[in-house]
Amino acid sequence: MADLEIRDLHVRTEDREILRGVDLEINRGEIHALMGPNGSGKSTLANTLLGHPSYEITEGSISFKGEDITGAEPHERAKAGLFLAFQYPVSIPGVSVANFLRMAINAKREEPIQVKEFRTQLQHAVELLDVDRSFTSRHLNDGFSGGEKKRAEILQMAMLAPDVAILDETDSGLDIDALRTVAEGVQRLHDEQGLGALIITHYQRILHYVEPEFVHILMDGRIVLEGGVELVERLEREGYDQIRQEVGAAHAGAQSPHVGAQAGAAGASAAGDGSV
Ligand code: ADP
Ligand code: MG
């Protein structure tokens, strides 16, 4: 049983079905990339995993560590060990990064964390992620650069030590500094804490800094292709359009996206299997 199990997920928003049967399994310690063209439903999946009320699950389920969280509140998901990075972090004037981190930790606990324990954990996270200690006394997101916002987010991730993190990178606008902060942070937390992650992105850029073991390609609300890091290179060479054409051709009439995922020879091998 996988830590995060998404089964046949159908999601609609504003009367339109956006996700049309997504299956995905992510374990602690695994780095996955979910890629896809604009409008394919990537952020819809991220928002649904977060428990965003605008997204209605009409079919399928999400379970985390064996518990059904399909209808769970966002804070219950966080408490269970799922972390969702904010795509557009808010600024909270007057709250320092350190205080924000303390609030985030306390939200997950029965008893507030002891000052000393908090300091030790913060020190560890700051060293692990190579963040300047003075950064933690600055006010959260107040005048932060894109990279600094991401640094605060990754620090939060280090402190909360989730089992699985979902990171939806905006298609438009992370600068290279922000991108590296996220990618290197995820890689370090993966190496040191066994973090599992789903990195959601349109572009290959971030995957130059963190290497996913598993790559899934989402098109029109379905995962149409799955593989290893070689898929990222293929995408770089061929682009989404060519992949869409191949998958579309191999697919015509096929029920399972995994049949289509066997690429060009799918039709032939399916016929072969049929004769057994
Ligand atoms: P991606 O992140 O892959 O670019 P999205 O999940 O943002 O794709 O969007 C997929 C489709 O769902 C788009 O057609 C988008 O317009 C629609 N959509 C997403 N969120 C909403 C929403 N809250 N209200 C209405 N339509 C939405
Ligand atoms: Mg998106």
Image: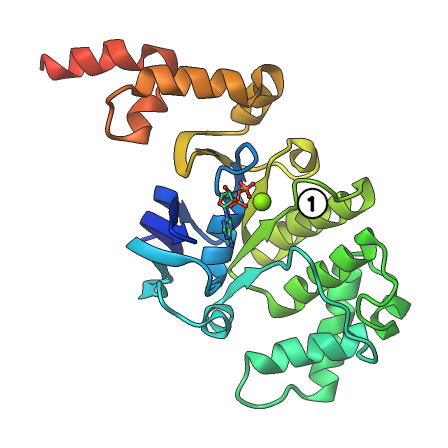
Check the image and name the residue furthest to the right. Answer: 134
* Label 1 within 8 A of ligand 2 by Cβ: no
Count of numbered marks: 1
Q: In terms of depth relative to the viewer, which is nearer, 157 or 77?
A: 77
Amino acid on which the number 1 mark rests in the picture? Ala
Q: In terms of depth relative to the viewer, which is nearer, 242 or 114?
A: 242
> Picture coordinates of residue 238 (x, y %)?
57, 15
Quadrant including the C terminus: top left
Q: In terms of depth relative to the viewer, which is nearer, 29 or 44?
A: 44
Is residue 146 among what the camera can see?
yes
Query: Measuring 51% from the left and 60% from the top, which residue is drawn there?
Result: 163
Is residue 29 among what the camera can see?
no
31 left or right, relative to 272: right
Q: Is residue 198 above or below residue 212?
A: below
Q: How is the image coloured?
A: rainbow
> Picture coordinates of residue 222 (x, y %)?
39, 36
Residue 244 in which image quadrant: top left
Q: Secondary structure at mark 1?
A: helix
Residue 272 in which image quadrant: top left
21 left or right, relative to 75: left
Q: Is residue 269 above or below residue 18?
A: above
Query: Measuring 64% from the left and 76% from the top, which residue is drawn there?
Result: 104
Check the image and name the residue furthest to the left. Answer: 276
235 left or right, relative to 49: right
Judge the density around disc 1: few (<14), some (14-19), many (≥20) Cα neighbours within 10 Å.
many
Query: Measuring 47% from the left and 50% from the top, which residue is drawn there?
Result: 45
Q: Write down the residue under mark 1.
A: 183
Query: Measuring 90% from the left and 69% from the top, which residue is drawn there?
Result: 134
Residue 138 in which image quadrant: bottom right
